Image: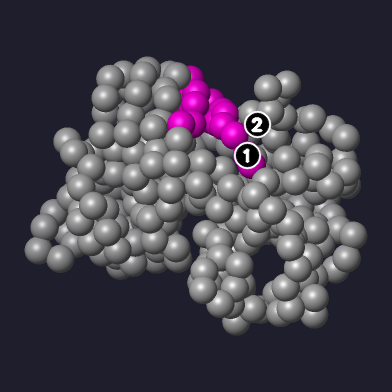
Amino acid sequence: MLLKFTKMHGLGNDFVVVDAVSRKVFFNKQQIERLSDRNWGVGFDQLLVVETPSNPDMDFRYRIYNSDGSEVEHCGNGARCFAKFVLDRGLTNKHIIDVETKRGAIQLRVLDNGLVTVDMGVPSFEPEELPFTADTSDSLYGITAGTEEYLITPVSVGNPHAVLKVDQLVDEQVANVGALLECHERFPRNVNVGFMQVVNPAEINLRVFERGVGETQACGTGACAAVVAGIKHGWLSPKVTAHLRGGDLHIEWQGEGSAILMTGPAEKVFEGQIYI
């Protein structure tokens, strides 16, 4: 099959986006792995598939696949790219777009300056929401990985995250501890691991080791998880700029029961075709 695609990125977190509205497209694990390969395929962190919604109140449905072929619930950077894609392709002329995802409905707002604000929904610290195995519900847990114990804040923002507050961001820690915690037995569906350095109450530096991918240049849901964890613990204010390797995201959260708002850019890189 000859596949038409668009390569996009949000702060360096890169995607292949496919229109499955105009033409039905289906993927298996092997096809996704081949497409994601940066030597033999196109290369991407996630594959985004744009579909017609099953809910008539929604404008679109979109599905998200990691480079290893696994389907995930949510992707903040991908959501912004999704919004730009459907507008650029003329699939909609709306600037407020309601989208159906595996984790539920989200709303995307394309701003006049080209940035996109995503209503990321209400986060949860309850262990069963991630899921995370714990005897009691808390906001900070000790977890042993390898020979060390780490203090983590598990947060669900539609997908599971474990946030670690660190004094410095170190390459070896992100790679090694991230890999250990990603597949830790206390996270039955694996987890995204965020390493957060608090600069001041309105700024953080962040690196994220994503499940099924490894470290990426940016992670929208990871930025949301880190900020709400920081606010939960009293380290951060309700509006925070998250500095990631690929650039900045602006996160706002007013506290328990409130939805997270994430604002950032989305860029098209090129369009192409490939046989799969």
Q: Is residue 3 left or right of residue 198?
A: right
At label 2, the amino acid type is Val
Residue pointed to by mark 1: 266
Instruction: Give how far across and how far down residue 90 sits, in percent.
Output: 88, 43
User: Is residue 146 rendered to the left or right of residue 180?
Assistant: left
Is residue 89 shown in magenta? Answer: no
Residue at the extreme left? 147
Q: Return the x and y of residue 243 as percentages of the image width and height.
A: 39, 32
Residue 92: image location, x then y, percent: 87, 40
Instruction: Kindly identify which residue carries mark 2.
Output: 116
Between 122 and 223, the one lying in front of the other is 223
Height in image: 216 above or below 222?
Answer: below
Question: Is residue 266 on the magenta stretch?
Answer: yes
Q: Quadrant of residue 175?
A: bottom left
The stretch of residues the image draws in magenta is 248-267
Which tag, 2 or 1, sits closer to the chain's start?
2
Q: Residue at x 86, y 58 (%)?
A: 21
Q: Could you tell whether 268 is left or right of 261 in the image?
A: right
